[in-house]
């Protein structure tokens, strides 16, 4: 039974707090708990894509998503996370390595063809054929008499006191327009680990399930005719001949919002690992991304909330200004010219249960940290990861270890436990912003047939990697706001 273990667990946590009081003084001790029933139930509530399950807009401009399949179908559709994840990392590295970019050639500046001789000094003998130079002229000094004193009988000019000038406060800007659609995990029937939205292309609109990606600019779908290779997708291929606006295509983002003259790719030869989605919706920083193309109407802002593993509420993707609810933690959006499509943040430390990793900020800042919607796990330098993993193991030593799962080397079997306790974690940024990670962002439960096995959702980056990556597991349940114009990224925990 689980209940006899709880006293020892509480005792272990108390001993942990007493033994590590000095280390935990860096911040408030923070532990999270989740029942095993919630973990198991989150697997049973897995949802699959069904175009007919999307309702009209409801309150707060969100959509409702209804379950359309259960865990049994998930087992049949589930594929290895590792193969897809490595393909994702490979794609990021191909886009990011400077060696993969063609060298830029700038021709040397030609030497001037016209040579001007030096000017002769004033009063010197001119060259043959040149007029004589004017002699140097010495001007006498200029004299300005002092201001006269007031004449007798005339009072001095009094000082004039001007009243203060009043500038009324500027009116607060009105909240910009926005439009919101739901998103679902790609594991819910699409065989990918990214997140999926449904939009429409063409006139009349042809629904397309697309993974959205902050690391890509161009949006694209698979198209008829498939002259080369098309992978298997759930929906019919997009048919350009059935769209009256194909030359200047229309993107139907929601039932209330369409974007005309939207450039996108129509792929008839498609290679790569995209599960069974129709294509991709690009949210990168380039000019072809949805965020850039809608910037003039929607303030250059978008946000998303990736639903938590327990799927208590649907996630969403919003284009336009997010409401200021007073809970946003903003940090600077870092721009790296060699990676123009990516969004970087300046991570400097990680807090685990109130214990701040004892590594200098340069461990993170020397290469930078990419915030990515498509990478599943968080990858940090080995020096930081080894300390983080060891600290996590120390706080979890009351639980039974389990074999590693692919890239994740720290796993536990929680069978027989009624409640799982784990340290809370936060990312800390150079400007003081803090992003608190949800309990389902610290560990993942990757097995459908063994739902009580959980793994630490962090890994060590390769020494050759160009930067660290904050993956989508750690972003789940938080609204992540990208204000591209103001160059800042905000985090609102527990938003979906």
Image: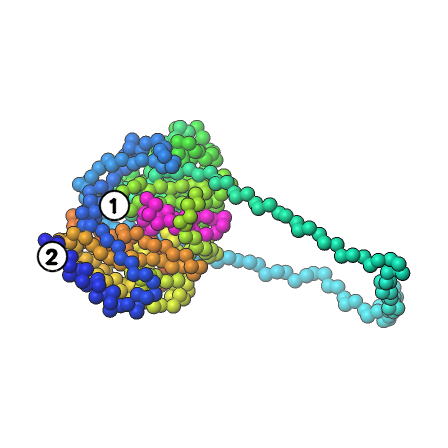
- Furthest-right residue in view? 152
Residue 395 quadrant: bottom left
Q: Is residue 185 left or right of residue 417?
A: right
Residue span colored magenta: 472-496
Residue that numbered label 1 is attached to: 310
Q: Quadrant of residue 381?
A: bottom left
| SS of the residue under disc 2 | loop
Residue 467 sits in which quadrant?
bottom left
The C terminus: image quadrant: top left
Residues at discs 1 and 2 in contact (Cβ within 8 Å): no
Residue 213, numbered label = none
Of residues 290 and 13, the one nearer the viewer is: 13
Which residue has dot 2 on it?
4
In the depicted structure, whether residue 182 falls above or below residue 89: above
* Viewer-side label of 1, 2: 2
Q: Is residue 89 at all visible to an observer of this figure?
A: no
The crowding category of the residue bearing disc 1, from other C-alpha atoms within 10 Å (few below 14, some 14 to 19, many at least 20), is some
| Residue neighbourhood size for the residue with mark 2, other residues' Cα within 10 Å, grouped as few (<14), some (14–19), many (≥20) | few
């Amino acid at each position: 039974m689980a209940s006899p273990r709880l006293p020892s667990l509480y005792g272990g946590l108390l001993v942990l707090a007493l033994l590590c009081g000095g280390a935990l003084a860096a911040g408030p001790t923070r532990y999270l708990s989740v029942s095993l029933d919630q973990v198991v139930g989150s697997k049973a509530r897995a949802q699959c894509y069904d175009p007919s399950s999307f309702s009209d807009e409801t309150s707060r401009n969100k959509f409702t998503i209804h379950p359309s399949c259960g865990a049994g179908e998930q087992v049949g559709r589930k594929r290895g996370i590792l193969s897809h994840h490595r393909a994702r990392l490979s794609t990021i590295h191909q886009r990011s390595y400077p060696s993969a970019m063609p060298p830029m050639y700038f021709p040397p500046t030609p030497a001037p063809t016209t040579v001007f001789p030096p000017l002769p000094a004033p009063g010197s003998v001119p060259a043959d054929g040149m007029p004589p130079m004017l002699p140097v002229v010495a001007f006498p000094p200029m004299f300005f008499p002092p201001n006269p004193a007031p004449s007798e009988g005339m009072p001095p000019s009094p000082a004039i006191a001007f009243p203060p000038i009043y500038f009324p406060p500027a009116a607060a800007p009105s909240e910009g327009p926005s439009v919101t659609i739901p998103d679902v995990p790609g594991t819910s029937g699409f065989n990918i680990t990214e997140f999926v939205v449904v939009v429409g292309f063409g006139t009349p609109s042809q629904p397309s399930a697309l993974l959205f990606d902050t690391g890509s600019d161009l949006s694209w779908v698979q198209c008829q005719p498939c002259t080369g290779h098309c992978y298997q997708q759930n929906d019919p291929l997009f048919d350009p001949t059935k769209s009256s606006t194909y030359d200047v295509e229309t993107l139907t983002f929601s039932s209330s919002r369409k974007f005309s003259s939207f450039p996108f790719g129509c792929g008839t030869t498609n290679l790569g690992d995209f599960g069974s989605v129709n294509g991709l919706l690009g949210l990168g920083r380039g000019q072809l991304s949805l965020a850039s193309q809608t910037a003039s109407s929607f303030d250059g802002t978008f946000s998303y909330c990736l639903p938590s593993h327990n799927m208590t509420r649907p996630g969403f993707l919003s284009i336009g200004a997010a409401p200021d609810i007073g809970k946003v933690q903003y940090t600077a959006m870092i721009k790296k010219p060699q990676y123009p499509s990516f969004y970087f943040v300046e991570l400097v430390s990680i807090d685990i249960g109130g214990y701040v990793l004892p590594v200098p900020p340069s461990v993170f800042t020397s290469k930078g940290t990419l915030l990515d919607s498509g990478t599943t796990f968080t990858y940090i330098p080995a020096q930081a990861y080894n300390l983080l993993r060891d600290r996590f193991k120390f706080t979890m030593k009351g639980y039974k270890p389990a074999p590693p799962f692919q890239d994740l080397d720290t796993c536990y079997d929680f069978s027989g436990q009624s409640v799982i306790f784990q340290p809370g974690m936060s990312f800390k940024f150079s400007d003081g912003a803090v992003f608190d990670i949800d309990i389902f962002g610290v560990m993942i439960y990757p097995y459908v047939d063994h739902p009580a096995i959980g793994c630490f959702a962090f890994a060590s980056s390769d020494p050759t990697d160009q930067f660290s990556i904050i993956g989508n597991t750690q972003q789940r349940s938080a609204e992540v706001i990208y204000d591209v114009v103001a160059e800042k990224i905000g985090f609102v925990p527990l938003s979906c």
